Amino acid sequence: MMLKTNEIAKMDGKEATVRGWVYRQRILGDNVFIVVRDAWGIVQCVIKKGAVDEKMYNEAANLYIESSVIITGAVKKDERAPGGAEIKASKLETVSRGEFYPIQKDLSEEYLLNVRHLWLRSRKMVAIMQARHHIMNYLREWLNSKDFFEITPPILTKAGAEGGAEMFELEYFGDTASLTQSSQLYGEAMIFGLERVYTFAPSFRAEKSRTKRHLTEFWHLEPEMAWTNQAQNEEIQEQMISYVAQKMAESHKGLLEAAGQNPETMKNVKPPFHRIMYDDAVDKINELGGKMEHGQDPGADEEALLLTVYDKPVFVKNYPTEIKAFYMKEDPDRPGTVLNADLLAPTVGEIIGGSEREWDYDKLIARMKAQNMPLKTYEWYSDLRKYGSVPHSGFGLGIERFVKYILKLDHIRDAIPFPRTINRLEP
């Protein structure tokens, strides 16, 4: 009976078969101990000399780490054994012995990035990738339960949402196109038919940043919502973030602990989140030892200072108009600021940027002209405001930053299978 490793312990006293890869192998006296791993865990198998034929014993003794095998034998429950049980093997099939595995202990981060295609098999990376899968599923689960529709935006575009200097340009049949920085503008087009939409898609930023939270290619969750103001936008964000944190703490405690996160920390992530105005945030940062001027966009260092006084995410609201994107609506009650909020999370910094969108045609055009934007390129976008425009809001969540926060990872590159940074394009 073929079983997963996490099912073996319940077969105490019975015969079972497991298949996977050699995680550990050692010879102790007349016994060859093989720890087999699969996607669900590990289990120890023992091949005893004299209990099996000589060919099988020698085959077991000469396996490499990561050799693929199928092992059958009697199960004995043993809390001391890896996986809580041991298989006394009666049959071993070597599917592929392979070659000597090049990853051992105490290797540099750079080397492990060079062999990323192999390092993804490590127990740590398996746990992170499983957690990433669940996090993305819970985000979709929450959005789908709130009447959002998932849409599929283009990756190639002419219109940048965050500034031309950060766009990856390429030749496109005699024209120039760019890899998308954000699917937001296309999401806005869809709300006039579907009202609540979201995209799960890659975004690309040509930022020359060498920090623990920057990638040049990352996955982006971007909801857009008709009939929604900024206050409602923030409530949606905190409910969604809290939902995922609670689900991970309740259902995947082992994955959190394997990555280094305390599940109790995630249980504390409940609405309402903290809120602070931008000007007050600047004052607080400087009070804590920072040197930030009003009108500056806080960087990683400034955000880290501010987060020392919070135990869960905090919204920083109403940034100055001149440092934020053209599509953000000015706050009529606070002229010179926009109806926006960046959500900062402990250990990471900004994980979400969101705002109420400027839905008045004339005001949007005036803002675009003030920033010397090519109106023709964005004509389709401004056109949306001519036909039944309504108040609407949206936000963008960086998936890798969110995974980094949920799992308390040291570096964002471990939150994605094959990280792309300014100095890494392989493997």
Image: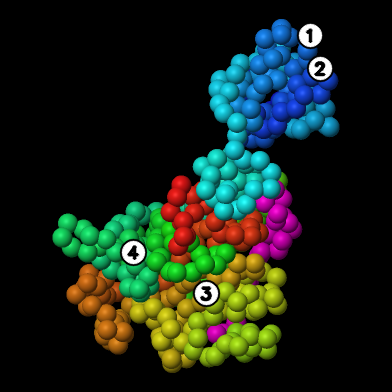
Few, some or many C-alpha atoms within 10 Å of disc 2 (few <14, some 14-19, many ≥20)?
few
Q: Where is residue 422 in the image (x, y as percent from the top left)?
A: 45, 62
* Residue 296 on the magenta span: no
Residue at numbered disc 1: 50
The residue shown at (57%, 57%) is 403
Residue at numbered disc 3: 342
Mark 2 or mark 4: name the one nearer the start of the chain: 2
Cα distance between the residues tagged 2 and 4: 60 Å
Residue 168 badge: 4
Rendered position, 320 above or below 396: below
The secondary element bearing badge 1 is classed as loop
Q: Residues at badges 2 and 1 in contact (C-beta under 8 Å)?
A: yes
Foreground mark, 3 or 1, reads 1
Mark 1 or mark 4: name the one nearer the start of the chain: 1
Mark 3 or mark 1: name the one nearer the start of the chain: 1
Residue at numbered disc 2: 30
Rendered position, 227 above or below 287: above
Mark 2 or mark 1: name the one nearer the start of the chain: 2
Q: Position of residue 251 (x, y in %)?
A: 66, 47
Magenta extent? 257-278
The secondary element bearing badge 4 is classed as loop
